[in-house]
Amino acid sequence: MPRLLPALLCLLAATLAPAAPAFDLPPWQQLVFEQRNFWATARGELNLKKGVAPLFPESGTEPFVRLEIQNTVGSSIESIVVDLAPADAASLARWRLSRGRDQRLKTHRYLGDSIIRERREPADGSAGSDGRTALSAGDGGWVSSGVTRIDLPAAAEGRTIITPHALFLLLPGLLDDPGRAGDYLVHTDLNFYRLIASPGGSETIEADFRLDEGRVEGRRGTRVLRLRAEPLAGNPEGRDFELMGLSGDIEFLVDRTTGLPLRIRGEAPRIGGAELNLVEAHSRPAPAKAAPAATTP
């Protein structure tokens, strides 16, 4: 009996502890959004990958999934790579390369109690246009211009730290239960945001996008989810939350049949209210089935 009591207490504590947020990988492997304007075309692409080398090998070899994002508006290009924990979409590592008039690379390594942020600049103007190549090859052509340790705020206690683009992976769960938004804290560069989700009802829209080898056209019924990022008091910088170039309150219009986000609404610089429409999607390959066990004659 004396040995049994501690075991029962541990089991009770595990039962009463809040469950960590979890998610299933979405049905898509690639999403491409686009919006044409009289002055420029905005295009955003997301790719979900598994089985690739981690951004920071020294951080360990735990399983992870990778989300690669590329946003293009005119001649400005932003490339982002995020390594995420497969159980809850927690951020493990991230880098962001901005290319336009200047080039700049920022990296973040997520530790248990802090984030290591580093800024890197082209050493002599010879850094290639593909920051991923430079990073994977030992940062050739890039030099560090500053390293900062960011302590996690008190609000991070009991919450999962995510990057804005992880919301694409968490979208199905938030649609079914918007209250789960409180389980997360969104990190941008130096700032942190609480996430508030609210259902926006239903909406029927016109869609036209490629899906694998076919095409989907016509009126589609959608579920609407509205997301708001509330900055924490004490953030060192002004509001910098954005998703695919959109800021402010973000609305996702998700196809009821395919589960794909068909439209994203928000605020765009110099335009105001704007939206991105899905123009292409590729499904994630189905997991391989295990071979049946051999039978003994």
Image (cartoon, helix red, strand yellow):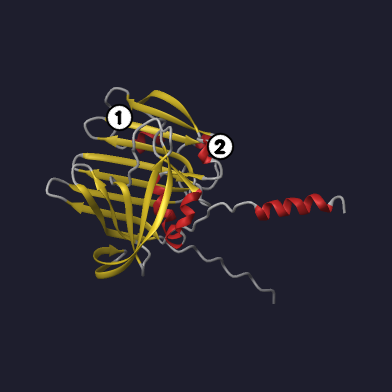
Residue 172, x across and y down, in percent: 43, 60
Query: Residue 77 falls in which quadrant of the image?
Result: top left
Q: Please say if 23 is above or below 241.
A: below
Q: Secondary structure at mark 1?
A: loop
Residue 34, x across and y down, in percent: 23, 53
Residue 230, x across and y down, in percent: 40, 43
Q: How many labels, in total? A: 2
**Left or right: where 196 falls relative to 18:** left
Instruction: Identify residue type, mark 2.
Output: Gly
Provide the residue designation for mark 1.
127
Q: Please say if 87 is above or below 58.
A: below
Q: Which residue is rendered at x = 26% and y = 35% of the image?
A: 99
Q: Secondary structure at mark 2?
A: loop
Task: Name the image quarter holding the N terminus.
Answer: bottom right
Residue 54, x across and y down, in percent: 47, 41
Q: Which residue is rendered at x = 47% and y = 60% of the image?
A: 177
Provide the residue designation for mark 2.
112
Say which of marks 2 and 1 sits in front.
Answer: 2
Which residue is situated farthest in the front direction here?
Answer: 233
